[in-house]
Amino acid sequence: MAYLLETKGITKRFGGLTAVDRVDMGVEAGEVVALLGDNGAGKSTLVKMISGVYKPDEGDIFLDGKKIEITSPIDALAHGIETIYQDLALAENLNVFSNIFLGREKTKKALGIFNVLDHGYMEEESQKVLDRVDIKIPSLKANIRNLSGGQRQAVAISRSIYWDAKVLIMDEPTAALGIAEQRKVLDMVKSLKKHGIAIIIISHQMYDVFEVADRVIVMRRGIKAGERLVKDTSSEEVVGLIVGAEEVGKK
């Protein structure tokens, strides 16, 4: 199995607490892996090491089979690893295309002297990426605060795709969304799979997992408690792994 992103023996300690203990995991291009576990299981700490928020105490991270060093979120972004947290990190007072280019704005010369924002270019490029992943937003000039939860999620996803994400980490992508909005987000995930993006989803929603994931990895008390292909398991077995009723490490 050729993983696009892989961790080997990755470990993180906070004082005397081992939050993640020698975890091996991977995700292929065009695959969705759901990272599951109860609160405090270590799943958030694991993805924060991948995304550069925390530096591992032990273990290695590989991208395309090559060992990489990730010591900050900037390092992760440079390697094409994008993370969409629950708060989405969007500026509500700015419009759609300004958020897609947030922190990486395109400028042009005015009067041959001054650098000014190139709104036309950013709007055109934003529309291209939205069309690419079949995302519909009525107006790219609308402020984020006026969009629905699903539309905001779409903007955050589009920003990641535009900046050439190879790996997309999504933290509870359907949390606090209505049923119709949840469906739209799940459809977006399926579209991203078709574009060859490797996706890691943290979720407590079992329906979402079985709808879009190819594999599930269950964390419990900092270790990898189990791994299953979605087509070969059930929600009952996965819950058993989460709470400890199933045999640890059984494949």
Image (cartoon, rainbow, N blue to C red):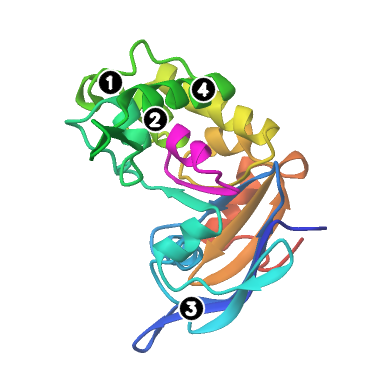
Quadrant in which the C terminus is drawn: bottom right
Give the residue pinned by disc 3.
56
Residue at 47 percent of width and 68 percent of height: 49
The 10 Å Cα crowd at callout 2, few under 14, some 14 to 19, many 20 or more, is many
Sequence-first disc among 3 and 1: 3
Boundaries of the magenta span: 158-173
* In front: label 2 or label 4: 4
User: At label 2, which amino acid type do we have?
Assistant: Val
Residue type at mark 4: give it: Lys
Q: Which circle, 4 or 3, is nearer the viewer?
A: 4
Q: Is residue 42 visible?
A: no
Residue 128 - label: 4
Q: Which of marks 4 and 2 precedes in the sequence? A: 4
Callout 1 amino acid: Leu
Tag shown at residue 147: 1
**Residue 77 visible in the current orientation:** yes
Q: Residue at x 48, y 71 (%)?
A: 221
Among the two numbered marks 2 and 1 on one chain, the one whose residue lies closer to the N terminus: 1
Image quadrant assignment for residue 120: top left
Residue 41 is situated, as x and y percent measured from the top left of the image, at 45, 65
Q: Earlier in the sequence, mark 3 or mark 2?
A: 3
| Disc with the residue nearer the chain's start (1 vs 4) | 4
- Sort mark 1 into few (<14), some (14-19) or many (20+) by Cα contacts within 10 Å: some
What amino acid is at disc 3? Answer: Pro
- Disc 1 versus disc 4: nearer the observer: 4
Residue 105 painted magenta: no
Q: Which residue is mark 2?
A: 155
